[in-house]
Amino acid sequence: MDQVHEDEVPQYFLCPISLQIMKDPVTAATGITYDRDSIERWLKTAADPVCPVTKQRLARDSDLTPNHTLRRLIQAWCVANAKDRIPTPKGPLARTHVRKLLRGLTVYPASLDQLLALAAASDDQHKVVLAECGVPKAMVSLIITCYKEKSTVGLDQAMKILAAIWAPNSEIKAQVEQNFDALIDSITWILNGTTEAIRNLGILLSKHIVKVVSSSLVERLKPEFFKAVVRILTLSGGDATGMVPTKAALRVLLDVCQHGRNKFKIIEVNAIFELIELEWAQLGPAHPDKRKIIELGYYLLDQLCSCADGRARFLAHSGGIAILSKRILRVSPVVDDRVVHIFGLISKYSATKEVLQEMLAVGAVSKLCMILQADSAKYLKDNVYLLTRYPMLQF
């Protein structure tokens, strides 16, 4: 809505908390009307919730009655004064209706479609209601059941519902952590043995899950899970239609890489080979999202090359050094920084005559010198200068 001067607006149209025109006026038990967002935020965060105007005590779950008459008056005034019409606020979500739909899931398959419609149209307030009614628990249970029965009936709706209401609240986190092993096994199956559309939902759900669970659970991820995630990189390749799942897969691997022995598990499932192959695929025509994928790929490659096994796998690929060289000064400063850092790791810890000869042959040394001559950031030039300290790069 356009901003208006306070003296132009009838005083009783303004929320006593935000001092802005109310979009969804509700009346508290004390008889004072506030904008719903403002009073709900106040009740949730105040140390001792009281009515901001009367100072009377209010319960945190205090009933708030929609003031339809005032809302219509505000709308009429906005129209008359050429202001944007206030959108009609959504009514409270009936918990009894949500619970009825959950009870009917096994009897009435259409209940799943109705839940999906509710979840897709939910705002933050409705998401809380859906979570408190047990929707996350029901969807996690359905996903695991589909895995155990090797059936995809209702699987895509369940994952869409869970994604639509996803928030790092205690209900969703509790359900994910309580069912972690079974849920990860289910997602591993989804990534390996279902349709492309369901696989894409599965990798997006994986990205959410690894962000909310504890480090101790992330450390328990199995090699089979990593193999399935890397498979997404293989299937997606450099195709524009695979950008979203490719980015999600890279983010999953990056988020879990530093936990426990996950880095070595990722290396063991041939992730470095697939990252280099993905890079070759990305050398085609430019795409707006390709730069982000390349940056994520180099962040992950840098992490994996920080250990000896990772560097050995990288150098075993005939195109590894060539692809590093080719990316210098062609994508972004982020990629340049990661490339220089990877070359530094190789030069410091994996120096051999053969590696140096390959770097010279593919023009890597020349490209590094170009960073010194180009309008690059000082820290990047300093990092290139550091490479000259290593015996194999006295250029």
Image (cartoon, helix red, strand yellow):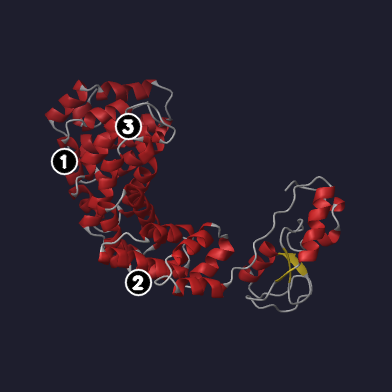
Residue that badge 1 annotates: 312
Which of the two discs, 3 and 1, labels the residue nearer the N terminus? 3
Say which quadrant the C terminus sits in. top left
Q: Residue at x 28, y 50 (%)?
A: 229
Instruction: Between residue 245 and residue 341, name the one nearer to us.
Output: 245
Depth check: 304 or 33 in front? 33
- Residue 179: x and y in percent read 33, 69
Q: Residues within 10 Å of mark 2 (few under 14, many from 20)?
A: few
Binning the other alpha carbons within 10 Å of mark 1 as few (below 14), some (14 to 19) or many (20 upward) gives few
Single out the mark in the foreground, 2 or 1: 2
- Among numbered discs 2 and 3, the one appearing first in the sequence: 2
Which residue is identified by label 3?
Answer: 282
Looking at the image, residue 65 lies above or below residue 85: below
Where 232 falls versus 20 (above or below)? above
Q: Amino acid at mark 2?
A: Gln
The circle on residue 178 is 2
Q: Residue at x 26, y 60 (%)?
A: 221
Q: Secondary structure at mark 3?
A: loop
Amino acid carrying label 1: it is Ala
| As drawn, 395 above or below 39 | above
Crowdedness near tag 3: few (<14), some (14–19) or many (≥20) residues, C-alpha within 10 Å: some
Going 37% across and 59% down the picture, which residue do you hit? Answer: 209
Disc 2 from disc 1: Cα separation: 38 Å
